[in-house]
């Protein structure tokens, strides 16, 4: 029998927690360090309630987090799941500690939660900027709709001729787009500021010092936030004659296209940004990640194609439809050929349905970047690494290029960086597990291409 991993492609969702006999015992805050190669993250369980537990999972002492929806409990054991990230947290309660394992995609780390508050363990990477800085640092707050976007400007001395606004990738990101101890946006911004190019990086809504609700937002909402940031920059007299453009990573690349398609943007840099519709992007992502973990091409394609069919059924279903019954024919076929155990079938069905309830995923699956790229009229640089397993370089760069040419944009540059992954780290495999293991935050080649292209703008 094939032992498939459940490679679900959603980026953000809810944890699991249900009725528990020891609800009063676990009520309150629990803090623990999750330590992986090159990084340390504080996880906080905020549990409340009597017989029915509710609460949040927070990261690095954030005031906001992911709401629990249910939970499984057997005796003194507690099982928490994040379905669309394929995460399980298995814990045992004993003497005011919750001890167990944190597992994602079959990789497990030990973790222990206690009642004492914890402070972040500083992980310093070689490329983290160190003063003295030859540029000014200015903190800003930008009001938009019902929330505040907090950010940091790096301003070189003298007249600002170019201002780059950064756009993060999917998931709740701070202004540095911090991941596994790396701060790629900080490193890029420092490099540009030292070359005389101003930058502005903001925390996502509901993340860090920004307010608002991240979890109900879609890519269109993030585009609205970016447009508000650009308007703020344009309103500042100090930048009256400056070129103002966008640097977007991953989902941030298509968000940049959405904003630039409306006009008023002087340049766009897409770092591993999508060029194909979201459902196709995620199908390819699943296939490539599975193959990187040892699955055959045929098995990886069969799995990703099935998930895509099921996903399309779910996202096109009318309101109130019985989703479990709607997709049962697909799983009945698996039952007949014996590819999955009944336990895995039920688990996958539950995870797929849970992952597709959120507004972000339902929007992103139908998001076609091509019409937006076609309307981008400003100078544009699109870069990918050839080892990128999350946004495949070939099909996405080609799609962006075709769209730009259809729209008549003759100021488009495409770059494929050999032996670079999704974060533009130099690598031989592109494996996601290397992100934290590699000390390099972003390659010098990638920094040079971004910097030189911006400096060459007329």
Image (cartoon, rainbow, N blue to C red):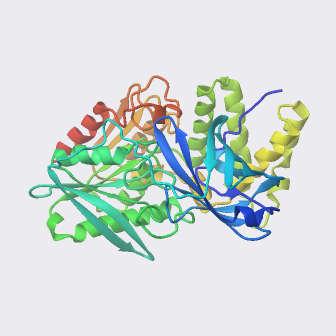
Can residue 457 be spotted in the picture? no
Can residue 111 be spotted in the picture? yes
Residue 453 place in picture, x, y as percent? 23, 40
* Image-quadrant location for residue 46: bottom right
In terms of depth relative to the viewer, which is nearer, 31 or 147? 31
Residue 332 place in picture, x, y as percent? 88, 42
Whether residue 177 sits left or right of residue 28 in the image: it is left
Judged from this view, the residue extending furthest toward the right is: 336
Image quadrant holding the N terminus, namely top right
Q: Residue at x 67, y 35 (%)?
A: 106
In terms of depth relative to the viewer, which is nearer, 263 or 7? 7
In terms of depth relative to the viewer, which is nearer, 411 or 102? 102
Residue 248 place in picture, x, y as percent? 38, 50
In terms of depth relative to the viewer, which is nearer, 385 or 177? 177
Q: Residue at x 39, y 73 (%)?
A: 144
Judged from this view, the residue extending furthest toward the front is: 95
Judged from this view, the residue extending furthest toward the bottom is: 146
The tally of labels here is: 0
Residue 33 place in picture, x, y as percent? 54, 47
Whether residue 70 sits left or right of residue 288 in the image: it is right
* Image-quadrant location for residue 353: bottom right
Q: Residue at x 60, y 58 (%)?
A: 115
């Amino acid at each position: 029998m094939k032992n498939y991993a459940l490679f679900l492609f959603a980026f953000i969702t809810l944890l699991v927690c249900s009725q528990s006999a020891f609800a009063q015992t676990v009520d309150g805050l629990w803090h623990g360090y999750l330590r992986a190669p090159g990084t340390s993250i504080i996880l906080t369980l905020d549990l409340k309630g009597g017989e029915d537990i509710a609460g949040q999972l927070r990261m690095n002492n954030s005031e906001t987090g992911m709401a629990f929806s249910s939970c499984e409990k057997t005796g003194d054991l507690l099982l928490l799941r994040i379905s669309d990230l394929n995460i399980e947290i298995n814990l045992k309660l004993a003497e005011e500690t919750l001890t167990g394992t944190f597992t994602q995609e079959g990789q497990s780390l030990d973790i222990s939660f206690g009642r004492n508050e914890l402070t972040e363990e500083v992980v310093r990477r070689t490329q983290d900027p160190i003063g003295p800085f030859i540029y000014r640092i200015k903190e800003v707050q930008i009001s938009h709709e019902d929330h505040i976007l907090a950010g940091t400007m790096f301003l070189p001395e003298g007249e600002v001729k170019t201002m780059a606004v950064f756009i993060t990738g999917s998931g709740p990101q701070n202004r540095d787009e911090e991941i596994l101890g790396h701060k790629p946006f900080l490193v890029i911004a420092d490099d540009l500021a030292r070359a005389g190019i101003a930058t502005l990086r903001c925390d996502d809504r509901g993340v860090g010092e920004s307010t608002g609700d991240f979890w109900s937002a879609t890519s269109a909402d993030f585009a609205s936030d970016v447009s508000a940031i650009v308007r703020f920059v344009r309103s500042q007299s100090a930048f009256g004659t400056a070129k103002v453009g966008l640097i977007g990573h991953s989902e941030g690349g298509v968000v940049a296209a959405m904003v630039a398609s409306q006009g008023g943007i002087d340049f766009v840099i897409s770092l591993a940004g999508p060029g194909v519709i979201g459902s196709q992007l995620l199908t390819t992502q699943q296939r490539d990640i599975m193959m990187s973990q040892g699955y055959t091409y045929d098995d990886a394609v069969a799995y990703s194609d099935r998930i895509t069919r099921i996903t399309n059924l779910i996202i096109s279903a009318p309101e109130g439809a019985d989703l479990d019954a709607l997709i049962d024919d697909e799983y009945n076929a698996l039952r007949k050929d014996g590819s999955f155990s009944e336990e895995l079938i039920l688990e996958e069905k539950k995870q797929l349905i849970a992952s597709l309830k959120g507004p972000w995923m339902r929007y992103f699956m139908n998001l076609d970047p091509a019409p937006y790229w076609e309307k981008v009229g400003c100078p544009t640089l699109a870069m990918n690494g050839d080892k990128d397993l999350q946004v495949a370089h070939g099909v996405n760069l080609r799609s962006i290029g075709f769209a730009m040419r259809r729209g008549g944009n003759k100021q488009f540059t495409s770059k494929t960086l050999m032996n670079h992954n999704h974060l533009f780290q130099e690598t031989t495999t592109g494996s996601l597990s290397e992100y934290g293991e590699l000390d390099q935050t972003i390659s010098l080649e990638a920094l040079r291409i971004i910097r030189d292209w911006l400096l060459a703008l007329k």
